[in-house]
Image (tube, rainbow, N blue to C red):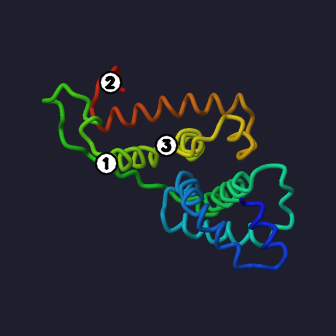
């Protein structure tokens, strides 16, 4: 489906790009947020990435999916933004209600929206590379090979980073909910 719109854009129909923007804006925002952890910066990155993708669409070789190509642009722009900022990130920790009186896993009590909120808050506390890998692999449901293609990192580096990221995410969630390590 993307190929049809890409061809139309290359033939001069700039309005066809709206389809690609609407299809990939949420995914691109999610990827940018996982790196910069700031909604205003993520929105700025999206604008830059979509403009760059549009202006350079003729260089898209179609060796991979359009989404993979766009992911690369968003990731590169996000890391550029981090390098430019070089500011210290202030770590605000959310202190959840005490669930210690109940033996049930607090995650089971939360509604789906609450779970998403806590997972996203936990992801904000992780380093950018680990957060990106978790988001691409679990939330966007890309395979290891697709994540390798998107990031350009080696398979072994991805697997090690994914392993460390899962451990760190578990630690953050355990701290947030004060759970036994066995529960998660």
Say whether disc 2 or disc 3 marks the residue closer to the N-terminus. Answer: 3
Q: Which residue is mark 2?
A: 183
- The number of numbered badges drawn on the structure is 3
> Which quadrant is home to the C terminus?
top left
Q: Going by the image, does 37 lie left or right of 83? A: left
Say whether disc 1 or disc 2 marks the residue closer to the N-terminus. Answer: 1
Q: Which residue is mark 1?
A: 114
How many angstroms separate mark 1 from mark 2 (CA)? 18 Å
- Residue 71: percent from the left, percent from the top? 68, 54
How many angstroms separate mark 2 from mark 3 (CA)? 21 Å
Dot 3 alpha-carbon crowd within 10 angstroms: few under 14, some 14 to 19, many 20 or more: some
Task: Out of 112 and 95, give the one closest to the viewer.
Answer: 112
- Disc 2 secondary structure class: loop
Nearest to viewer (mark 2 / mark 3): 2
Q: Which mark is residue 126?
A: 3
At x 79%, y 49%, the residue is 64
Say above or below: 184 vs 37.
above
Q: Are marks 2 and 3 in contact (CB under 8 Å)?
A: no
Nearest to viewer (mark 3 / mark 1): 1
State which quadrant residue 181 falls in: top left
Dot 1 alpha-carbon crowd within 10 angstroms: few under 14, some 14 to 19, many 20 or more: few
Task: Out of 64 and 86, give the one closest to the viewer.
Answer: 64
Q: Which mark is residue 72?
A: none
State which quadrant residue 110 falls in: top left
- Disc 3 secondary structure class: loop
Q: Are marks 1 and 2 in contact (CB under 8 Å)?
A: no
- Residue 26: percent from the left, percent from the top? 54, 60
Say whether disc 3 or disc 1 marks the residue closer to the N-terminus. Answer: 1
How many angstroms separate mark 3 from mark 1 (CA)? 19 Å
């Amino acid at each position: 489906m993307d190929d049809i719109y890409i061809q139309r854009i290359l033939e001069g129909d700039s309005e066809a790009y709206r389809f690609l923007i609407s299809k990939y804006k949420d995914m691109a925002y999610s990827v940018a947020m996982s790196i910069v952890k700031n909604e205003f910066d993520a929105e700025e990155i999206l604008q830059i990435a979509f403009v760059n993708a549009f202006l350079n669409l003729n260089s898209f070789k179609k060796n991979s999916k359009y989404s993979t190509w766009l992911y690369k642009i968003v990731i590169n722009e996000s890391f550029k933004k981090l390098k430019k900022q070089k500011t210290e990130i202030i770590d605000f920790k959310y202190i959840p209600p005490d669930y210690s009186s109940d033996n049930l896993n607090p995650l089971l009590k939360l509604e789906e929206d609450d779970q998403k909120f806590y997972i996203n808050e936990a992801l904000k506390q992780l380093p950018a590379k680990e957060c990106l890998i978790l988001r691409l692999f679990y939330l966007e449901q890309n395979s290891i090979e697709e994540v390798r293609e998107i990031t350009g990192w080696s398979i072994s580096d991805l697997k090690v980073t994914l392993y460390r990221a899962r451990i760190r995410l578990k630690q953050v969630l355990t701290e947030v909910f004060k759970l036994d390590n066995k529960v998660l």
